[in-house]
Image (cartoon, coloured by chain):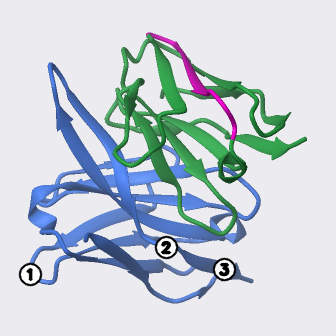
């Protein structure tokens, strides 16, 4: 079955860059869109951005100036970089697959998620 | 940006109850609306996509309705495993957004 696994440092210093990787197994990264979502402690879900295997991206307007999502098809991975982090970026970070359903229209939803990785920004 | 607003923010109910959670979009999103269930310490799981389509493997007591700006998630007869936080999410825009969540608690 399809599995996603986030990896990266659990602790990042303020003003530095957060870097995470999502490794996909059981599916080709070249067939789907992929997402990053985060959840600050005790708060709700926040969409960060999407990427297609071709490299086309969409980012949350609130994070757009600081975020880059990239894909490595040879490793079946996609990655998140968030620059100039502050304590407000402390969160559990999830990667997810965007499944596509075609009826009369084209629908996307996040059907497979990683377990999440906790990133703490320290001062 | 499309803002998603859920109500209520929290809800207490008993096993066997019928409950509904509302989600309102700041503009029309047709039926590009998904619902997710999240249990403590776990990743979210989709329950409904395209406003009313039941994800494979999800019990039929879950249903979704609505179109345009107003949507509802209904659980027809609450089971112990349904107590969780539920989020709506729009995919009408290429810039996705989630509602703030509704925590469903045991009365």
Query: Does any portion of residue A88 appear in the rendered image?
Result: yes
Real-space Cα separation, disc 2 to disc 1, in angstroms = 23 Å
Q: Colour of chain B?
A: green
At 59% from the left and 71% from the top, the residue drawn is A85
Q: Name the chain letter of the residue that bears numbered label 1.
A: A
**For this rendering, which residue is in front, B52 or A61?**
B52
Q: State the SS at label 1.
A: loop
Query: Does any portion of residue A64 appear in the rendered image?
Result: no
Give the left or right position of residue A6, taking residue A87 as reference. left
Real-space Cα separation, disc 3 to disc 2, in angstroms = 16 Å
At 69% from the left and 50% from the top, the residue drawn is B84
Give the left or right position of residue B85, taking residue A54 as reference. right
Compared with A94, B23 (above or below) is above
Q: Which residue is mark 3?
A: A120
**For this rendering, which residue is in front, B82 or B98?**
B82
Colour-to-chain, blue: A
């Amino acid at each position: 079955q399809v599995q996603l696994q986030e990896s990266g440092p659990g602790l990042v210093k303020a003003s530095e860059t957060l870097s995470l990787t999502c490794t996909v197994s059981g599916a080709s990264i070249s067939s789907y869109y992929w997402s990053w979502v985060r959840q600050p402690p005790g708060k709700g879900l926040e969409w960060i951005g999407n990427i297609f295997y071709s490299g086309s991206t969409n980012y949350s307007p609130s994070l757009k100036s600081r975020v880059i999502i990239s894909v490595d098809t040879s490793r079946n991975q996609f990655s998140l970089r968030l620059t100039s982090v502050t304590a407000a970026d402390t969160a559990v970070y999830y990667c997810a697959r965007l499944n596509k359903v075609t009826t009369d229209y084209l629908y996307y939803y996040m059907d497979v998620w990683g377990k999440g990785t906790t990133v703490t920004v320290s001062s | 940006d499309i803002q998603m607003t859920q109500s209520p923010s929290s809800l207490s109910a008993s096993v066997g109850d019928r409950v509904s959670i509302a989600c309102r979009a700041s503009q029309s999103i047709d039926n590009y609306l998904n619902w997710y269930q999240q249990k403590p310490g776990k990743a979210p799981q989709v329950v409904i996509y395209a406003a009313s389509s039941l994800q494979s493997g999800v019990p039929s007591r879950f249903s979704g309705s609505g179109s345009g700006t107003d949507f509802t998630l209904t659980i027809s007869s609450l089971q112990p495993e349904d107590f969780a936080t539920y989020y709506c999410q729009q995919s009408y825009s290429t810039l996705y957004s989630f509602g703030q969540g509704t925590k469903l608690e045991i009365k």
